[in-house]
Image (spheres, rainbow, N blue to C red):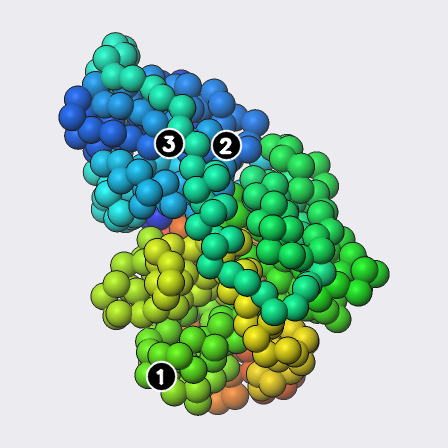
Amino acid sequence: MVRLNRAIFRKYDIRGIFPEDLDADTVRRLGWAAGLLSGGGNGTLAVGRDCRLSGGRIFEWFSGGASSTGCRVLDLGIQTTPMTYFAAHLLAPDATAMITGSHNPPAYNGFKLMKGLHTLYDGEIQEIRDLAESAPPEEHPAGTVERVSVADRYAERLVSEFAFERSFTVVVDAGNGTGGGIACRLLEALGCRVVPLFCEMEGSFPNHHPDPTIEENLAALKREVVERRADLGIAFDGDADRLGLVDDRGRTVFGDRTLVLLARSLLETYPGSTVLSEVKASSVFFSEVEKAGGRPVMCPTGHSIIKEAMAREGALLAGEMSGHIFFRDRYYGYDDALYAALRLLELLSRSGRRLSDLLDTIPPMHSTPEIREDCSEEHKFEIVDRIRRSLSGRYRVTDIDGVRVDFPHGWGLVRASNTQPVLVLRFEADDPGEMRKYEALIRSEIEDAKRGIDVQGAH
């Protein structure tokens, strides 16, 4: 039996470099596994892809493998990940695949998989690997491949839900990813004056990397918002499931602060509701949701995990600091950056206030952005575990996803990314001095853990 590269099978999805990790045989085998996931000869598999340069070739290999099982493949074409989730609800295929590298560099690509409306993660991803390794050595297409578009139905669904009471000037930075065209189309249909920035699809991402969690990627958007005197700026990652936000004063707005505004609005309609966020979220999120009459719940990071947690907890809203925002109120419960942006514009329309004014009502804390430190896939989880063991006896530690350490005047986080070879860090405190102190402590623990691994490896 063939043994596939274990490193591409992540916690939430499958992701690797094309064509080194995602070669023709590997992708064909994954398609065969997805075809079986759909039910083979009795099943339907819907497949969308983002605009990365490798997407067309990967679709060809993947659909060939899938059709070898006899399943019917629906080619959704190039579209955002949320549009592919929408297709899963609209078309009700037996399984759905999105070919995307999300916020990773251009050389990456991968797969997000669903069975019915359930997003596969963790052990289920490993089961797909096992199936793929058992695939026959050659493909024998027996099923069909049909082209289907859901773009118009998706646009109708979103436009029909909103009617803003005032007009907005919105700068849209798609980072040359997949979300620019549909976002501009819908915002204009809703009466917004749209200023497009890098909205042409170009899979090499020539202007900046399409990851709105990194401050430098928002530089052009911030300038444009201020120069145009826009009401706000929105940015997307490569497949438009992450929302980046810049207020009317050109300030970056982290996802947890966006979530506070959306939660306050939701709780006016549904008092006592549960709102989820994850381990990177500010302590202010949890206190402000409580203050607004809601029930805040912390859960691990990851779109698949959050969707499951929302269903389990009965939550109507959830979000990550990275800009993934999930609505089960009036929507389907998946992360859709464009839908979240429209809900925010609706909130602004009803309030009659500027975004910056609403943000200034959130208590200030000194916090870092999401910090990513390169770390080998081989050692990243062991480093975090060593830090957990070191700090658990001295501080209050939350270890549902990495290590979040509560300090007297703030907190610090270190976790292993499930999508990249990095450690993710974040720190927050009442004042900058305390925040720097917490960061220094955690960084010292990281170095100690690395030295421990080196010493262990030398023996």
Amino acid type at image mark 1: Pro
The residue at the point 51 percent across, 64 percent down is: 343
Spot occupied by residue 318 in the image (x, y as percentages of width and height): 40, 66
Amino acid type at image mark 3: Val
> Is residue 193 at all visible to an observer of this figure?
yes
Circle 3: is it few (<14), some (14-19), or many (20+) Cα within 10 Å?
many
The residue at the point 51 percent across, 53 percent down is: 159
Residue on which the image places disc 2: 78
Q: Is residue 212 above or below residue 165?
A: above
Query: Which secondary structure lies at badge 2?
Result: strand
Residue on which the image places disc 3: 47
Residue 182, image quadrant: top right
Residue on which the image places disc 1: 271
The mark lying in front, picked from 2 and 1, is 1
Front in this rendered view, residue 38 or 137: 38
Amino acid type at image mark 2: Ile
Q: How many marks?
A: 3
Q: CA distance from mark 2 to mark 1?
A: 40 Å
Spot occupied by residue 358 in the image (x, y as percentages of width and height): 62, 80
Extreme residue in the right direction: 227
Q: Is residue 136 above or below residue 406?
A: above
